[in-house]
């Protein structure tokens, strides 16, 4: 016979459960993940190089994992800071998932790591949907990308705990309108902090590390409106009935919840 | 284009549910709720779904997507509005920033239509129910 079976399962439930588990596992050993999202060429590797150096100077044990479709160029650049670095090649996959990250950390991440920076695949669309077990999600955009970037990629900017503008040293040359950019960020993510940086000139360098350390020390992070969806579907009841000739079965819902960042 | 990953996740979850239920012979359709702000393109998902179903119990299954419009509410002034795309998440009336997203981030499997080898509901309370009529969409 033909049945209609209610599943009520979040499609990304597996990723979210994996992220939750990884966050708890890392928290237990004192490590906090910072997930960096941006378009290709936004300058996140350049900024991260500076932040890693900064961490070394301050004797904060950090590590970095960088994901790209191909080449180990970014890892080679980040490794110059002297901190543990790992390159992940996704073989064409456009984003990282929590299970992939957990696999890559196993046997590599040094025990005393306080902060793990994850440089996600350069892409503002897909990585936005995947919680990696991070405590701080940072979305970056360079001044060359246009003030409306947050409106074009609302999920990436809407779910960020912190927004970082890069390459401010060339802001004048490209006529970057800071007020317009800030207004656009505010529209999709009211209340999120926007930090201006220039890895070349040193402007704002160290702020990302400060925010990451604060989050690691338990300071509350920004709670984006987009991530604060009320959990109206999380039921776990089981019942069957056979009216009108078809059966509805409710198998146990496995984590039918929207993902949250706390 | 993470729609392929999303499609594979849907297929995996439906296949697992079918395995748990036992004796499922074919999946006819899967109904999915996709919020306006879920970051998933329904057309790309439909294309990926067909590929992801190939060679599984879901081969040939139809994907029915239900769009959920984004809606938000302002905590201080209680105004409710359609967020639109790109979403406006500050209050259009009082410009407040203490707002709440009511709907629009859904990405969930609602239900599945499948065929199984059983003749009627396994529940003993329905043992006397009349012979079910196969439900067609």
Image (cartoon, grey):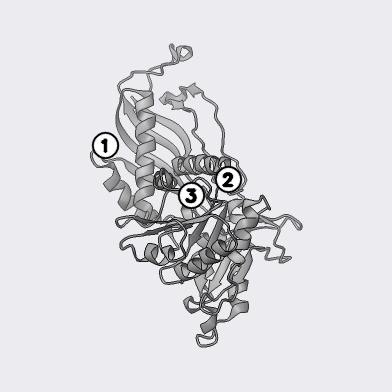
**Mark whose residue sits in front, 1 or 2:** 2
Viewer-proximal residue among A18 and B2: A18
**Mark whose residue sits in front, 1 or 3:** 3
Q: Position of residue B36 (x, y in %)?
A: 50, 56
Dot 3 and dot 2 within a common chain: yes
| Disc 1 from disc 3: Cα separation | 28 Å
In this rendering, position of residue A175 left or right of residue A248 = right
Residue at the spot x=47%, y=38% of the render? Answer: A9
In which chain is the residue bearing label 1?
Answer: B
Where residue B32 sits, quadrant-wise, is top left
Viewer-proximal residue among A241 and A136: A136
Determine the secondary structure under disc 3: loop
Where residue A235 sits, quadrant-wise, is top right
Residue at the spot x=41%, y=41% of the render? Answer: B31
Q: Quick one: label 1, few (<14), some, or many (20+) residues within 10 Å?
A: some
Q: Quick one: label 3, few (<14), some, or many (20+) residues within 10 Å?
A: many
Depicted A146 relative to depicted A261: above or below = below
Please give the residue where the numbered disc 3 appears in the rendered image: A132
Determine the secondary structure under disc 1: loop
Can I make out residue B39 in this image? no
Depicted B127 relative to depicted A98: above or below = above
| Disc 1 from disc 2: Cα separation | 42 Å
Q: Earlier in the sequence, mark 3 or mark 2?
A: 2
In which chain is the residue bearing label 3?
Answer: A
- Which numbered circle lies on residue A30? 2
Dot 1 and dot 2 within a common chain: no
Dot 1 and dot 3 within a common chain: no
Q: Position of residue A88 (x, y in %)?
A: 36, 55
| Disc 3 from disc 2: Cα separation | 16 Å
In this rendering, position of residue A31 left or right of residue B117 = right
Depicted B119 relative to depicted B11: above or below = above
Please give the residue where the numbered disc 1 appears in the rendered image: B56
């Amino acid at each position: 016979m033909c049945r209609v079976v209610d599943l009520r399962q979040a499609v990304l439930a597996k990723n979210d459960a994996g992220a939750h588990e990884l966050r708890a596992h890392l928290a237990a050993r004192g490590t906090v993940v910072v997930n960096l999202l941006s378009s290709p060429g936004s300058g996140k590797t350049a900024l991260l190089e500076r932040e890693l150096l900064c961490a070394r100077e301050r004797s904060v044990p950090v590590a970095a994992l960088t994901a790209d479709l191909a080449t180990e160029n970014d890892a080679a650049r980040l490794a110059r800071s002297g901190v543990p670095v790992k390159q992940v090649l996704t073989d064409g996959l456009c984003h990282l998932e929590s299970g992939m990250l957990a696999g890559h950390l196993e046997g590599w991440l040094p025990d005393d790591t306080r902060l793990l920076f994850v440089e996600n695949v350069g892409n503002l669309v897909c990585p936005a949907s995947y919680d990696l077990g991070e405590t701080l999600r940072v979305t970056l955009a360079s001044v060359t990308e246009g003030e409306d970037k947050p409106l074009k990629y609302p999920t990436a900017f809407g779910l960020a705990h912190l927004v970082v503008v890069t390459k401010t040293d060339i802001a004048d040359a490209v006529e970057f309108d800071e007020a317009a950019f800030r207004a656009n960020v505010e529209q999709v993510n009211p209340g999120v902090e926007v930090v201006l940086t220039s890895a070349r000139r040193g402007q704002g360098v160290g702020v990302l590390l400060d925010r990451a350390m604060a989050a690691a020390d338990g300071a509350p992070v920004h709670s984006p409106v987009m991530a604060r969806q009320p959990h109206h579907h999380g039921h776990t009841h089981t019942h069957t009935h056979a009216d009108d000739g078809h059966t509805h079965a409710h198998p146990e819902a496995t984590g039918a919840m929207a993902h949250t960042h706390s | 284009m993470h729609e392929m990953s999303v499609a594979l996740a849907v297929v995996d979850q439906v296949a697992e549910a079918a395995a748990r239920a036992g004796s499922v012979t074919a999946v006819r359709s899967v109904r999915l709720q996709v919020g306006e702000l879920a970051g998933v393109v329904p057309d790309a998902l439909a294309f990926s779904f067909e590929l992801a179903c190939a060679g599984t119990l879901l081969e040939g299954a139809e994907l029915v997507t239900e769009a959920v419009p984004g809606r938000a509410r302002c905590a201080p002034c209680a105004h409710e509005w359609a967020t639109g795309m790109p979403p406006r998440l500050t209050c259009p009336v009082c410009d407040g920033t203490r707002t709440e997203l009511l709907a629009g981030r859904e990405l969930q499997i609602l239900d599945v239509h499948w065929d199984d080898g059983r003749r009627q509901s396994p529940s003993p309370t329905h043992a006397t129910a009349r012979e079910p009529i196969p439900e067609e969409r």
